[in-house]
């Protein structure tokens, strides 16, 4: 949908009115939003990295125990 002239001006005027409403200027959720962003940027990639590292370690352990269980030639 492409907004033209009059519709675009109406939309901009409506958005300016919304910015001035006090209940929309409330910043009480800003801290929660910051924590969500921190979790999304640091904690989740860290979790995935640890999960991948533990999977690699488990595979290595399984390989070593298999090799140690082989009989001598």
Image (cartoon, grey):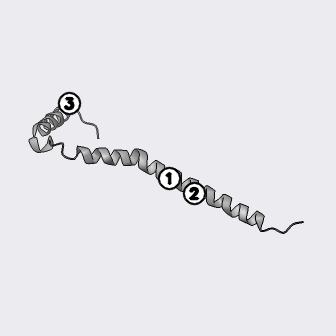
- Decide if residue 4 is on the left or right side of residue 17: right
Above or below for 43 versus 15: below
Residue at disc 2, secondary structure: helix
Q: Marks 1 and 2, Cα distance to the nearest angstrom? A: 10 Å
* Numbered-mark total: 3
From this view, report whether residue 31 is shown above or below residue 72: above
Q: Which mark is residue 54?
A: 2
- Residue 23 image point, x, y percent: 11, 45
Choose top left, top right, bottom left or bottom right for residue 24: top left
Residue nearest the observer in this picture, 46 or 37: 46
Residue 35 locus on image (x, y percent): 31, 47
| Nearer the observer, 9 or 60 | 60
Q: Nearer the viewer, residue 14 or 37?
A: 37
The quarter of the picture where residue 72 lies is bottom right
Closer mark to the observer between disc 1 and disc 3: 1
Instruction: Specify which label sits upstream in the sequence, 1 or 3.
Output: 3
Q: Is residue 58 left or right of residue 10?
A: right
| Mark found first going from the N terminus, 2 or 3 | 3
Residue drawn 39% across the image and 48% down it: 40
List x then y, in percent, for residue 37: 34, 45
Please give the name of the residue rendered at 15% of the width and 43% of the height, measured from the top-left corner.
26
The crowd level at tag 1 (other Cα within 10 Å; few <14, some 14-19, many 20+) is few
**Which label's residue is closer to the chain start, 1 or 2?**
1
The residue at 26%/48% (across/down) is 32
Residue 54 percent across, percent down from the top left: 57, 57
* Mark toward the viewer: 1 or 2: 2
* Element under disc 1: helix
Q: Which residue is mark 3?
A: 5
Q: Which residue is mark 1?
A: 48
Q: Give the alpha-carbon distance from disc 1 to disc 3, as whole Å.
A: 48 Å
């Amino acid at each position: 949908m492409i907004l033209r002239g009059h519709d675009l001006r109406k939309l901009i005027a409506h958005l300016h009115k919304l910015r001035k409403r006090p209940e929309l200027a409330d910043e009480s959720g800003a801290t929660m939003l910051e924590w969500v962003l921190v979790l999304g940027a640091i904690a989740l990639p860290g979790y995935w990295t640890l999960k991948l590292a533990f999977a690699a370690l488990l595979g290595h352990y399984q390989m070593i125990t298999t090799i140690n269980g082989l009989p001598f030639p």
